[in-house]
Image (cartoon, helix red, strand yellow):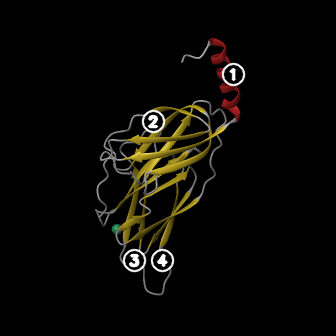
């Protein structure tokens, strides 16, 4: 049934009134190319009417090197945050952090890289650790000069509406302005940028998003 002109007008008024005041709860489930949940993906919501987006406060995040892996594999932090790398292996790691080749951070974003050398953990001593403060938004790749199989990712953002998918491929964001928005997905093992999706956010919105991303099995 087509809404009458007056009913549509009332609906538009209601929408305009709530567009600035109301905040949506958004749940997104991200799927890999094979239809399985995609963990460790970054989901960003870009509301069309986010006139005064609050900038998230920097945090302290810990990234361990343990059994030749970065844990967690993906770290999502606000710009200005500090990453503390802690080596729990008995051997040395020479960590490097470089801008990921493919990002959707856009022109003008020129994130810079970092390197740090961490001695092996000695019995009875504190685990060797060092800090990096991330000042440039963007996607970064973690690696180790000594162990080519080690890989991890850091995503730095100014957006308050960013989240990392859990083992079920799911995120929940609260306080997102209602109305039109763009939904973006990033994953460290994507081969090409995923196209942004246009969505409309109501008070509670849930989306399932299929992608062309197929992560390798973790060694
Ligand atoms: Cu290493």
Q: CA distance from mark 4 to mark 1?
A: 59 Å
Q: What is the x, y in percent for residue 57?
A: 64, 52
Q: Quadrant of ligand 1?
A: bottom left
Q: Is residue 9 left or right of residue 68?
A: right
Disc 2 element: loop
Number of labelled discs? 4
Relative height, residue 146 to residue 124 (above, below)? above
Disc number lying in front (3 or 1): 1
Disc 1 element: helix
Residue 106: image tag: 2
Mark 3, residue position? 120
Q: Earlier in the sequence, mark 3 or mark 1?
A: 1
Q: CA distance from mark 2 to mark 4?
A: 38 Å
The answer to whether marks 3 and 4 mark residues whose Cβ atoms lie closer than 8 Å is no
Residue lying at 40% horizontally and 52% vertically, measured from the top left: 98
Mark 1, residue position? 13
Q: CA distance from mark 3 to mark 2?
A: 38 Å
Mark 4, residue position? 127
Relative height, residue 207 to residue 13 (above, below)? below
Disc number lying in front (1 or 2): 1
């Amino acid at each position: 049934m087509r809404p009458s002109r007056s009913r549509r007008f009332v609906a538009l008024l209601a929408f305009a009134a709530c567009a600035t005041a109301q905040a949506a709860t958004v749940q997104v489930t991200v799927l890999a190319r094979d239809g399985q949940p995609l963990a460790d993906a970054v989901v960003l919501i870009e509301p069309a009417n986010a006139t005064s987006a609050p900038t998230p406060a920097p945090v302290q995040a810990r990234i361990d090197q343990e059994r030749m892996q970065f844990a967690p594999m993906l770290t999502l932090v606000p710009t200005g945050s500090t990453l503390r790398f802690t080596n729990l292996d008995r051997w040395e790691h020479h960590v490097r952090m470089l801008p990921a080749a493919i990002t959707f951070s856009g022109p003008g974003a020129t994130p810079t890289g970092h390197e740090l050398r961490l001695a092996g953990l000695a019995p009875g001593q504190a685990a060797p650790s060092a800090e990096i403060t991330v000042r440039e938004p963007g996607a970064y790749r973690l690696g180790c000069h000594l162990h080519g199989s080690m890989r991890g990712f850091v995503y730095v953002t100014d957006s308050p509406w960013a989240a990392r998918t859990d083992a079920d491929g799911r995120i929940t964001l609260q306080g997102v302005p209602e109305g039109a928005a763009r939904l973006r997905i990033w994953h460290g093992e994507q081969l090409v940028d995923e196209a942004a999706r246009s969505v409309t956010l109501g008070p509670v919105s849930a989306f399932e998003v299929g992608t062309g991303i197929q992560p390798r099995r973790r060694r």
